[in-house]
Amino acid sequence: MDGPRQDDPWAVEPGAFAGCTDPADRLRFLLTYAVLAPSSHNTQPWRFRLHGGARLDLLADRERALPVVDPDDRELTISCGAALANLRCAAAALGEALEVAALPDPAEPDLLARITARGPCPPAARMARLLRAITARHTSRQAFEPEPVPATLREEAIAAAEQDGDTWLHWVESPAQRQAIARLVAEGDRVQMADPAFRQELARWIRSRHSGTQDGISAAGFGLPDLLSGGMALLLRRFDLGDGQAARDAALAEGAPALAVLATPGDTPRDWLAAGEALERMLLTLTAGGLSASYLNQAVEVPALRLRLAATVGAAVPQLLLRIGRGERPSPSARRPVAAVLDET
Ligand SMILES: Cc1cc2nc3c(=O)[nH]c(=O)nc-3n(C[C@H](O)[C@H](O)[C@H](O)COP(=O)(O)O)c2cc1C
């Protein structure tokens, strides 16, 4: 049996932060939480650059882009926003004051955020449960139990998503809206799966847990035996499995206790970064409340369906579609260690 890797970010122990006295060490430690963020196809499309002791840049790693499903790097930027949210959460919970400038230099579009550490500050006690949620959050692709999401948790999740005032979370519980959205999701599956380039791209990111790679999605992530990872990739490459996927996802959407559409006023990198931060704040809040979430982004990724989704829920610009409920917690997906994503100058 393989033991946990020593540099596996999932094994992070918050107590070790106290031993980091040097400012650069403190930032390196906080990055362990950043890299645990969710990302599309688990591409982990982020890089960090540490300048001296106290300045850290978050950069988009466009070599990890998904040009077919995400041609504008919209989801790539959302994923980086989620990593930034984890960094902020860990800093607040452990006691490091950060100043963050989003997209500070128009001449450097890959520079998504410039972070300056302002030194130790009192840890925010209310963030401790969200810090624990960073290591407990996993995308759960199985069906959820049917019981509704408690109203207090729903309100907390909405408040977390909308905290900065530049994103909205539309919570969908009405059966009619849910059915309309389920139809859009099914249509999205058929459109995407009919495209061999989409299937090739997805297959490239499916990996066995034992392949030794530290990114991508394993069959285990879909609730299937890991042994099927190779077979799944092969099947995807060769066959249009759209109808089966459509039926499965429509049932998941219709049966979910709640669906949620995260939306922004515009559709620029700034909106995407904000959406990523809002996504992760919401996911951590739900995780701390014992709930799970999963994505049904087909209806956002296919442009014509995105417009229909916006009209269905009355949202400005939908960025993500999620289903939410209580479900099994899957095992953690692979992560690259901090050293693999950090450059120091
Ligand atoms: C912007 C974004 C889009 C995603 N889209 C999907 C999706 O359409 N379907 C899906 O099953 N998972 C989707 N995911 C979840 C990722 O596959 C997941 O975060 C990644 O595999 C890492 O696993 P973890 O979330 O369990 O840590 C998305 C995640 C992000 C951040």
Image (cartoon, rainbow, N blue to C red):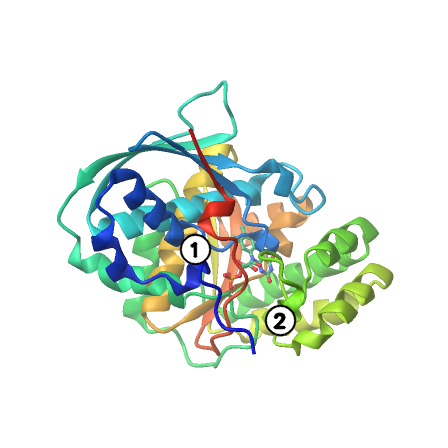
Q: Quadrant of residue 191?
A: bottom right
The secondary structure type at the circle numbered 2 is helix
- Tell me which residue sits at (61%, 55%) in the image: 41
Badge 2 amino acid? Phe
Work out which quarter of the rendered image holds the N terminus and state it.
bottom right
- Tell me which residue sits at (37%, 57%) in the image: 282
Work out which quarter of the rendered image holds the C terminus and state it.
top left
Residue 303 percent location from the top left of the image: 66, 44
Residue 39 percent location from the top left of the image: 53, 52
Vertical placement of residue 305 versus 325, above or below: above
Front-lying residue, 106 or 155:
106
Mark whose residue sits in front, 2 or 1 = 2
Residue 63 percent location from the top left of the image: 64, 38
Labels 2 and 1 touching (C-beta < 8 A): no
Question: Does the beta carbon at disc 2 come under 8 Å from ligand 1?
Answer: yes
Q: Is residue 156 visible?
A: no
List the residue tagged with mark 2.
Answer: 222
**Callout count:** 2
- Tell me which residue sits at (39%, 68%) in the image: 136
Vertical placement of residue 126 versus 305, above or below: below
Front-lying residue, 66 or 6:
6
Vertical placement of residue 73 versus 129, above or below: above
- Tell me which residue sits at (34%, 64%) in the image: 133
Mark toward the start of the polypeptide (2 vs 1)? 1
List the residue tagged with mark 1.
Answer: 170
Kindly identify which numbered label has been placed on residue 160.
Answer: none
Badge 1 amino acid? His
